[in-house]
Amino acid sequence: MDNRYNRWLVCLLAVAGCLSLIFVFIPRQTSARTSSEPYSSWSDYGGSSDSMSYSSINQINKNNVSGLKQEWFVPAPGPVGRFSFNPLVIDGVMYVVGKDDAIYALDGATGKQLWAHPVEGGQPTNRGFNRWISPDGKDRRLIFAVDGYLQEVDMNTGETIRSFGDDGKVDLREGLGRERSEFNQGVQSGTPGRVFENLLILGSAPGEMYGSPPGDLRAYNVKTGKMVWIFHTVPHPGEFGYVTFPPNAWKYVGGNNDWGGMSLDEKRGIVYFPLGSPTYDLYGADRNGANLYGDCLLALDARTGKRVWYFQLIHHDLWDYDPAAAPVLLTVLHAGKKVDVVAQATKFGFLYVLDRLTGEPLWPVEERPVPQSDMPGEASWPTQPFPTAPPPFARQKFTLDDINPYLDPEERERIRNILVNARNEGIFTPPAYNRDQIAVPGEHGGANQGSTAADPSTGVMYVKTYDLPTIHRLTETAPSHRSTTSGTDEQRGYARYMQTCVACHGLNRARIPFPKEMDLSHFVARVRAGKGEMPAFPETALSPQDIGFLAAYLKNPELGEASEASESSHIAAPPGQKRFYGPFGNIYRAENGLPAFTPPLVVTGRL
């Protein structure tokens, strides 16, 4: 390979149809203060503000890891959703979510509880916390959100800091330029933000449906809770990017949000946001245009929120291709010079490597023609940006030749029929009307949330990627908004299924572990424990009554789906616009548990 690429090694691993668990062991600190050595503590989400997910501590290594023994154990709730909690370890104290979703401070050496802080209204930010410590070390704050309210506690005592916001709370639904009555979902993200100087910089998770709130980026003063700056990710009139949407789209288009992570260059005061798709994410006739800042890597001045640069990875997203992995900040040797870069891995298998100061790609990115939509009213973008290097790290097609030869003949024929009859033209195949469309590696595949890490001492970047081919079929039938508190058991179970399960199992209820002969106790055990990709659902996520309703629906789905309403949102569509919806199911694993395609792809290479 050209020696231009020989100084930055990128290791990439594709795992077929499965998720991994990553365990980070952090030895006890030997000093009273956190070590000043870089990457020697785990005091930020992902280890450090640059999202490196790296520890320089070498007490545990490949020679002694086999001898590790459990020193202490504290039960913690299972993850609500697909992602696990990331504790913080600061000065030998571990901060976690524990029993009853309370926040606990534990002695890192013994597991002894130092304090507990109960929360009201739900689970705290379910992937981790932020922390802020004053220069003199006397003011120490743990920052989190619950039920859409930003809150802080004293790290020494666990007591609520009442001087923050309004009696200790800041409503994250305020200040977005729309009436709260218009929102059909909250804005709190499961991923914490980044602290820079006296600012907490936040993304959001406003949902992906019609009527979702905008994903504006905001910074709050960590001492007062006052908003210091806001960046409109769906541009307002007069702002750069406004013309990439129809007029007044800023009043109804949502999304364009950072939900998977962000990275901070503390030296330069620049924060890098991988922004997701605008809503609705599988059909965009009401948002024709390139749709800035959707699917952009966006660099902002951390102190002011002013735009430094942007690079759009997808124009007019129709695939839910949010760049969900946090950007990685590295220094590489390029054309004989050291260059500070930001590397963004994507769901669709490309790694974009850009100059951290200018946003210019290190290697050419070509706008290439892509398949066009046949959906009524849709105007898909004619080209998409293809990086010429490095090569894709994920499978980007699923053809007849890729079907796993070890499947049973009947299963092989079933998958063959799906592929033959579907629209299947690669990663930018638009969703189709009343016809299957194949998405590979799929919106739950590729490099998703929490899937990147790097070693700053070697320049090695690691990308964890999945092959999860998905079927989409656009229809005019809206997802359920039936109440989970009224109707028959089957109808209430259907409503809960549409809220909790449909994103992974689809409208066709694929891979549901509830044949009619299955005992209810076994079903409850499966839901509580999880299996494979399916997470465990504690009672805080699904009550025993909810599981009973789900079981009733899954045994008799026709009773639950009867008389379903056809409109998904109380927010009216723009005049003259239809709405289409994207039910989908997974085909990445056959009925016997084997991958539907040939064995996993493993890619390693030098840049």
Image: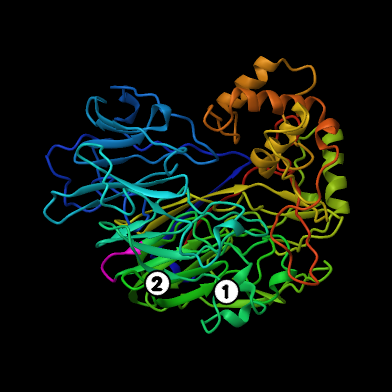
Q: Is residue 605 left or right of residue 553?
A: left
Numbered disc 2: secondary structure:
strand
> Would you say 48 lies left or right of 592 here?
left
Q: Residue 365: percent from the left, percent from the top?
A: 56, 76
Residue at numbered disc 2: 300
Colour setup of the view:
rainbow
Q: Which residue corresponds to mark 1?
A: 292
Spatial CA span between label 2 and label 1: 15 Å
Q: Residue at x 86, y 33 (%)?
A: 558
Is residue 118 one of those drawn in magenta?
no
Any part of residue 437 in sight: yes
Given residues 6 and 254, the one toward you in this image is 254
Indicate the amino acid at tag 2: Leu
Q: Is residue 266 magenta?
A: yes
Q: Which residues are magenta?
A: 264-268
Disc 2 or 1, which lies upstream in sequence? 1
